[in-house]
Image (spheres, grey):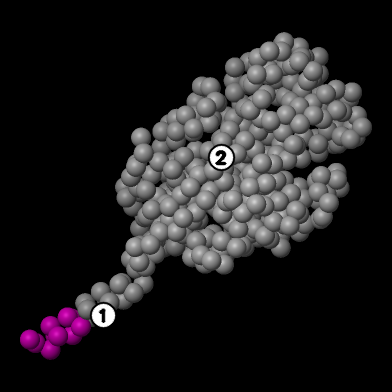
Amino acid sequence: MSRFLKIRSSIVISLVTLLSLVGCGPGPKDNATTLVRIGWQVPWATQGQITQVLAHTNILERNGLSGEFKGFTYGGPLNEAALAGEVDVIFTADQPAATLLAAGGDWLIIGRLMYNRVAIYVPPESAIQSVADLRGKTIAIPFGAAAQRDALKAIQEAGLDPAKDVTSINLDIYEQTSVVQSGTRQKWEKFDAMVGFDPTPAIFEHEGQARMLHVGKVVSLVLMSQDFISKQPQAPKRFLRAFTEAYFYYATHQEQANNWFKEASKLTFDTAVLDIAAAVEPNIKASSIRDVRITLTEEDLKVMGEAAEFIYKQGLIKNAVNMRDRVNMSYAEEVTKDFKAENYDPNQVKVTLP
């Protein structure tokens, strides 16, 4: 063998050895997969589509993970499961995240989930024309959801005292549809107004069953249990990589993802309402996986801080929490950097469930 061939052969062997040591894909170095229990909110649009992409494709498997999906109606019950150690990752909004951390939850904010609409809405022929008109009225609110914080803030900014000038009653988001359908175009049983998060208000709006009185936007987050991270130190990056892939798949297969979500949520609506719900989220317009942003901006951090401060002042949590202290963007930043450096092939993502 010539000296040149010997050198070339040595280089090839070295490269093969190196690839076998570091791995050539996003998954683990061996054949083992890590089970991750994902807590998600079944009637909540956009994160619902992302969850269903993870459930219906090989994306988790590609990243050395397997998923167990645990659905909850909104942030309150999800927090209870998180505190009980029943989930490893949760998809939630800024307010319930602050509530979880204030309650002593040992969780880390590792990524941005989405921006989502929250709203206060009234029957289409209600005499109520502004938030200020809610004085003396009764409002249905899913307690513990970020929509509650935004609504109380809007009421306060309208010059009303949320604790004295309105009556707030806890009503699960799933119960709103039956109450609206049994009510009139002027009032919904004992409720003058409701508070909720998409797709429920988007459905009511699309079908002419409600009129939006106030529409806000909240920052939603991906949190992971610190106990889970200590046991599976590679899990945050692997999961966020899978999460980013799922986001991009959703962006490029919106009709399919919307139908998966509609079936899983058991909500009856025209999928056109999901366009209303997702309009505030820039990631669904991604034309490349490099366009997907899962990191938090300074403005996002500010909004999260304001949310935590607001619910503390309202007495909704007993302990103040500094949201910035519970954020670790290093995993998301690494994933973002990796995708920008590599030639990602979306055709490797396959549907595994119909």
Location of residue 124 (image quadrant): top right
Please name whichever residue, 278 or 184, is drawn nearer the observer in this view of the structure.
184
Q: Main secondary structure of the magenta part?
A: helix
Which residue is identified by label 2? 71
Q: Can you say whether 250 is above or below 127 in the image?
A: below
Q: Which residue is mark 1?
A: 14
| Residue segment shown in magenta | 1-10
- In percent of width and height, residue 212 lies at 70, 24
Quick one: label 1 or label 2, which is nearer the N terminus?
A: 1
Whether residue 16 sits left or right of residue 329 in the image: it is: left
Type of residue at label 2?
Gly
Mark 1: which amino acid? Answer: Ser
Label 1, label 2: how far apart the Cα atoms are: 47 Å
Q: Are marks 1 and 2 in contact (CB under 8 Å)?
A: no
Label 1 SS: helix
Residue 21 drawn in magenta? no
Q: Describe the element under mark 2 as helix, strand or loop.
A: strand
**Of marks 1 and 2, the one in the foreground:** 2
Residue at 67%, 24% in the rendered image: 176
Q: Which mark is residue 316?
A: none
Q: Is 246 drawn above or below residue 34 in the view shown?
A: above
